[in-house]
Image: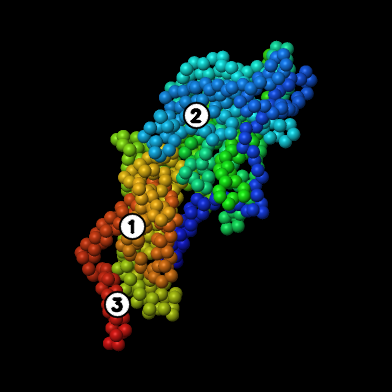
Amino acid sequence: MDKKNKIIGIILLLTAIGLYAWDTYQKAEYAKKHPAPQVATAPAQPAQITPSTSAAPTAPTPAPAVAPTGTDADASTGNLAPVEAQIITLENDTIRLNITTLGGGIQTVALKEQADTLANRKTPAENPYLFNADGTVPALALSIDNAANRVPIEWAPPFTVVENVPGKRVVLSAKMAGGLTVIRSYELAEDKTDPHVISFKTTFRAGVSDVVPAMNVRLNTGTLPPSIGDSTHQFLGIATYDGSNFHKTGVADFNASSGFLGMGGHAAKPYAFIPRGENQWQWVSVTNQFFAGIIRFDEATRAQVSDLYIHPAMTHLEPGQVVPTVTSITGEVGFRIGELSNGQESTIAATYFVGPREYTRLANLGGDQEKAVQFGRLFWFVSVDFLCKIFVVILNGLHSILPESPWAWGFAIIFLTVIIKAITWPLVTTQQRSAERMRQFQGPMKEIREKYKDDPKRQQQEMMKLYQEHKINPFAGCFPVLIQIPIFTGLFFTFQTLAQLRFQSFLWIPDLSMPDVIPGLETIGGFPIHILPVFMGATMLLNMRLTPMPNVEGQQKMIFYGMMVMFPIICYKMPSALMLYYSVQNCLTIVQTLITRRKMRRETAAAPNTIVNAETTTRKDKKKKRDKSRGR
């Protein structure tokens, strides 16, 4: 029994420490002796393609520096004249695209159902969240590899609008020197698909009597900033998926770090090249904690995908910092375009999902796009994805049947807590009855220990005899305690990645995805005030006081109480949704404990000769100690 209590206490403590370590692992630590290379964040210069009559492909060469607003060549002199970009709007009831005629990319995507800030949560249509608002280039912007160092150079020729069907379709065209025509089209999804999906094509067409050399063209994935709740940037990254393998590159790779406890330290990367490998990529995504941009390639296009170039997109310089912190990254997907001649063309076709990173929504899109939602792993290797998916389905189902209300998600979390408690009620009752029964037999067990303290083998035999005679299982409480660990871990990752909780209020809590605060009492003396973790800690201590812990004393008791103090501290800045669950769970457990104890007391009163009254024995022992200390 002693070993069991030690093991349970250590496991729970390690679980809490492991979650805390996972949550803080990616914090960047910069060293002055190993600064990260400076990366320019200004838009790169456009390039021109010069056709060649040779059959051998030649690498494109960068054009001279031009005005950032675009250029157009004068037919008679060849001089480059600035061209002003025009913005073409394409929208439905859910999203609004601002497409620039300079390069034909998407400057921003306004998500009309998602507010930009907490203060504007009631008016998302007027203050929408803007995808790629912090991007240095438009999403899906074209670029071409520099022949010298493979670093992409933005290629932004001026396009003209050749078709514009409001709310449905936009087609742009640009005719380049050498007979190359580039056609870019965007079309919003029909009613049968998700309204956040954009279908797009980019076609490269050679003139009837022209030859365009082979080249490697790139499309920008778009840029997302880190969310306020993701201070370590653990959810922000660029990922690829080939049907079986998911590979993510995070912001941490571009910041120097000494690692966690000396493990995982690395220097900063100025950029990263990800080769495609043997399997064709189905999609490439850019994500943060709540939003995603996923480029899913058409079947014919997948064979053209060559690699992925990832580089910093946003940086932040703290006072006293020598090297800025990279806070966001962006990617350039490479496509191989073969030599084109005599009117031949090559097309890049894909869908582009831009919207909230909701597991069920992405799963309905097909192509395993829900894998863009990564739930995390306990201790970096134990997967809890199965539990997280169950929790997401249950929460969505509960929310859908609740009346529409600003507090609906809070009530959904409470009902989920009740469901989990109902499922674990018999197991926890078994644990509590076992603990109570052990407490009631504490007197006889103490006598056995004292009587056979010099004979451990005989002591164990007598203990087992006592257990068998009175049907006591000293290990009955292990499993109910251990089963709470994966449940808590699964909810920890679920609530951190559940996009639906963003800006959802409950009671005094303004945002369930963030630590709770009382409006007007956010801090005291600069220290953040969060009520739920404190309440959770208080209910944990009360529950511990109500639950009998026979044979737990001295060092073991210190471990348990130390865990109860550490746990709220570790959870202090975790999402209030998780703290709401755990607080309600503790309250329900307290009620269950009181019910179990009352029922067992009735059983004891009904059969007084079958159970030893440990409380009377304990009082007698205490009286003897007091009398002895007083010299009686």
- Residue drawn at the location 56% of the way across and 30% of the way down: 139
Image quadrant in which the C terminus is located:
bottom left
Q: Name the residue that disc number 3 marks.
A: 622
Where's residue 286, x and y in %?
Answer: 55, 36
Where's residue 443, x and y in %?
Answer: 32, 73
Tell me the SS state at disc 1. helix
| One can see residue 302 in this view | no
Residue at the far left: name it.
Answer: 606
Q: What's the amino acid at mark 3?
A: Lys
Q: Residues within 10 Å of mark 1 (few under 14, many from 20)?
A: many
Spatial separation of the CA atoms under disc 3 and disc 2: 73 Å
Between discs 1 and 2, the one toward the N terminus: 2
Vertically, is 548 above or below 160?
below
Image quadrant in which the N terminus is located:
bottom left
- Residue drawn at the location 35% of the way across and 42% of the way down: 505
Q: What's the amino acid at mark 1?
A: Thr
Spatial separation of the CA atoms under disc 1 and disc 2: 45 Å
Between discs 1 and 3, the one toward the N terminus: 1
Tell me the SS state at disc 3. helix
Q: Name the residue that disc number 1 marks.
A: 539
- Residue drawn at the location 60% of the way across and 46% of the way down: 324
Where's residue 566, x and y in %?
Answer: 43, 60
Residue at the far top: name it.
Answer: 208
**Viewer-proximal residue, 380 or 325?**
325
Vertically, is 576 above or below 370?
below
**Viewer-proximal residue, 75 or 272?**
75
Between discs 3 and 2, the one toward the N terminus: 2
Q: Nearer the viewer, mark 3 or mark 2?
A: 2
Q: Name the residue that disc number 2 marks.
A: 109
Q: How is the image coloured?
A: rainbow
